[in-house]
Image (spheres, coloured by chain):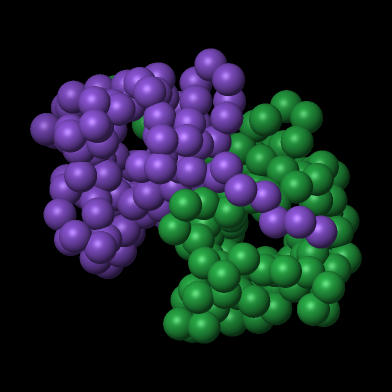
Chain colours: A purple, B green
């Protein structure tokens, strides 16, 4: 999948066997939906297919978002941060992002 | 600072000596500004002061955002995700969030 150029800062993370954090944000509403993780293969699959695949740290396997629930995420854009260890994915979210059924995983507030 | 109740899911992370990821989002524009990390003390300081303090993984010290640059982040709200290992901070960002001078750290896009 060499037609996609993964930036060198992000490559460096993968070369160090580090994951990158991936923030999914609703491309229309700008709501932050979830935070998950990507390894090189999941980012390559995401770029190649236009649908988001994460790396599940708990299951230690590729996690094609929505594979079982149908709650897929179509990619609008992917940005990377200044030190290359975090990605911002603007997505079109089908249904709920959260496994609880909530639209966003960040549905509870810390009271001050 | 026991007047603030840190949710048990988030406490569990700290009890396991894990950091939590902290996404900063502009409370007005909804732009995602940066991703950083918090330990228990940084979250307590953030809740107590109303201004964001992170934990710097590279320097292994508390990092009061804007302490040197003046680019402080005032807290509007803090949410936590379904598994308690990520926070979403809606903030009022003074100046640039990124050390490069860009408003957001996610200023570069991966071309597809």
Hey, which residue is sitting farthest top in the picture?
A28
Q: Is residue A72 above or below residue B16?
A: above
**Residue located 70% across and 72% down the image:** B42
> For this rendering, which residue is in front, B74 or A111?
A111
Q: Is residue B66 visible?
A: no
Give the image location of residue A9, x and y in percent.
38, 51
Hey, which residue is sitting farthest left in the picture?
A1
Give the image location of residue A91, x and y in percent.
41, 25
**Is A86 on the left or on the right of B53, as rendered?**
left
**Residue located 75% across and 36% down the image:** B27
Rendered image quadrant of residue A18:
bottom left
Rendered image quadrant of residue B43:
bottom right
Give the image location of residue B79, x and y in percent.
64, 50
**Is A49 on the left or on the right of B86, as rendered?**
left
Quadrant holding the N terminus of chain B: bottom right
Q: Is residue B89 visible?
A: yes
Q: How many marks?
A: 0
**Is B1 on the left or on the right of B61, as rendered?**
right
> For this rendering, which residue is in front, B105 or B90?
B90
Give the image location of residue A97, x and y in percent.
40, 34
Q: Is residue B15 above or below residue A10?
A: below
**Residue located 66% across and 41% down the image:** B25
**Residue located 58% across and 54% down the image:** B80
Quadrant holding the C terminus of chain B: top left
């Amino acid at each position: 999948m060499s037609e996609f150029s993964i930036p060198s800062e992000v490559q460096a993370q993968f070369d160090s066997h580090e994951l990158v954090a991936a923030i999914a944000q609703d491309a229309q509403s700008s709501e932050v939906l979830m935070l998950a993780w990507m390894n090189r293969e999941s980012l390559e699959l995401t770029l190649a297919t236009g649908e988001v695949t994460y790396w599940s740290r708990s299951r230690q396997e590729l996690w094609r978002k929505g594979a079982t629930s149908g709650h897929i995420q179509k990619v609008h854009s992917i940005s990377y941060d200044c030190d290359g260890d975090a990605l911002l994915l603007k997505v079109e979210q089908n249904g709920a992002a959260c496994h609880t059924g909530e639209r966003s995983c960040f549905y509870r507030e810390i009271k001050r």
